[in-house]
Amino acid sequence: MTLVAIICLLSGALVKAAHSDRRTHESKLFQSLWDTLEKGEVLVADRGFCSSAALASLLARGVDSLMLLRGLINERNRGCPISQ
C-alpha cells in the first residue's frame, strides 16, 4: 500500500491521508490532497513531491510550499546554510 498524508506541524495531528495500491504513484496521491490546503498555508514536502507543475499549481491556489529541489544536494553544499 502507498500512503501520503498531510500532518499539522503545530499539533502533529493527521489532517488528511490518501492511500492506494502500489501501482499508484505517490505524486498522484499528493495531488488528491491539494483541496485540503487553504490559501495562506505553507506546505513542507519531501523533494520527491517537488516539480514545477506542483509548485505552480500550489502557488495558483495561494499555498506557499517549501521543498528541496531535486539535484541540488552535492558534497560541496551539503549541510551549508542558505546564506553561504
Image: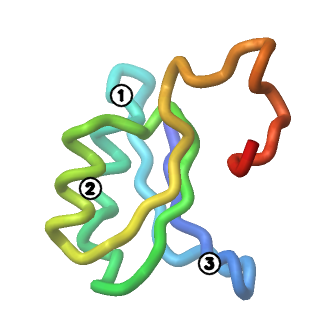
Number of the front mark, 3 or 2: 3
Spatial CA distance of label 2 from label 1 is 11 Å
Q: Quadrant of residue 84?
A: top right
Residue at image location 47% in from the left, 73% down from the top: 42
Where residue 66 appears, as percent x and y from the top left, is: 51, 56
Where residue 67 appears, as percent x and y from the top left, is: 51, 47
At label 2, counting other C-alpha atoms closer than 10 Å, the crowd grade (few under 14, some 14-19, many 20 or more) is few
Q: Amino acid at mark 2?
A: Ser
Residue at image location 19% in from the left, 72% down from the top: 61
Above or below, comparing residue 78 to residue 19 in the picture = above
Where residue 31 appears, as percent x and y from the top left, is: 27, 51
* Mark 2 residue element: helix
Above or below, comparing residue 57 to residue 11 in the picture = above
Checking the image for residue 34, the label placed there is: none
- Labels 2 and 1 touching (C-beta < 8 A): no
Q: Quadrant of residue 11?
A: bottom right
Task: Report which residue position mark 1 lands on.
Answer: 25
Q: Amino acid at mark 3?
A: Cys
Dot 3 or dot 2: first in sequence order is 3
- Labels 3 and 2 touching (C-beta < 8 A): no
Q: Amino acid at mark 1?
A: His
Task: Report which residue position mark 3 lands on.
Answer: 8
* Mark 1 residue element: loop
Checking the image for residue 32, the label placed there is: 2
Spatial CA distance of label 3 from label 2 is 17 Å
Q: Residue furthest right?
A: 79
Where residue 47 appears, as percent x and y from the top left, is: 53, 35
